[in-house]
Amino acid sequence: MRAAWESVHLASVALADGSPIKQRLVVAFSKYLAEIDGAELPRPARQELDSIRRELTRVPPLQGESAVMATVRKMSNDEASRQAQRIVRLLGVLVDEDLALRPRHLAVVPVYGAEA
């Protein structure tokens, strides 16, 4: 899961760039998310990534472009922003899953000294 987590993190960082939202979305998905093996992800994250993939590859490409480029080209800036937000939320799902899997080590700290 570490490689997938890092890819989603890098996609989120790419979305924070100063370029136009559609360009950022194409880069984030194509460079970092397209090749993630869904089997590496916990079920909620896998389902969300699959949904994002379907949404970003639904338009058949023209010659010389990818399905992602064609789909994002047809989107409004608001639609592209919503898809970008989904990618950032996907990172949140992975962080939550990672925290849930970590063992919790709690120490009991005495407030008062032992009485004799």
Image: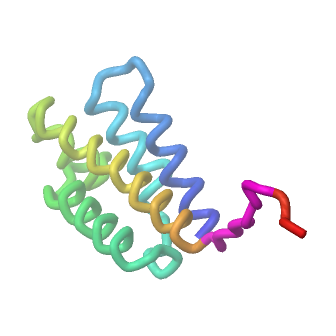
Q: Position of residue 69 (x, y in %)?
A: 27, 44
| Residue farthest top in this picture | 18
Judge from the rendering whether residue 77 lies leftward or rightward of residue 33; answer left or right.
left
Up-down relation of residue 40 to residue 76 (above or below):
below
Q: Magenta part of the protein: which range?
A: 102-112
Up-down relation of residue 102 to residue 61 (above or below):
below
Is 14 covered by the magenta stretch? no
Judge from the rendering whether residue 76 lies leftward or rightward of residue 57; answer left or right.
left
User: Looking at the figure, which quarter contains the C terminus?
Assistant: bottom right
Taking the spot 63% from the left edge, 70% from the top edge, the residue there is 102
Judge from the rendering whether residue 10 lies leftward or rightward of residue 80; answer left or right.
right
Judge from the rendering whether residue 84 lies leftward or rightward of residue 4; answer left or right.
left
Taking the spot 30% from the left edge, 22% from the top edge, the residue there is 20
Taking the spot 34% from the left edge, 41% from the top edge, the residue there is 26
In this view, the residue in front, 68 or 14, is 14
In this view, the residue in front, 109 or 55, is 109
Q: Position of residue 63 (x, y in %)?
A: 25, 49
Q: Position of residue 67 (x, y in %)?
A: 25, 55
Q: How is the image coloured?
A: rainbow
In this view, the residue in front, 28 or 43, is 43
Q: Position of residue 115 (x, y in %)?
A: 84, 66
| Residue farthest right in this picture | 116
Is 106 covered by the magenta stretch? yes
Q: Main secondary structure of the magenta part?
A: loop
User: Looking at the figure, which quarter contains the N terminus?
Assistant: bottom right
In this view, the residue in front, 74 or 77, is 77
Up-down relation of residue 83 to residue 113 (above or below):
above
- Asked which quadrant contains residue 25, the reply is top left
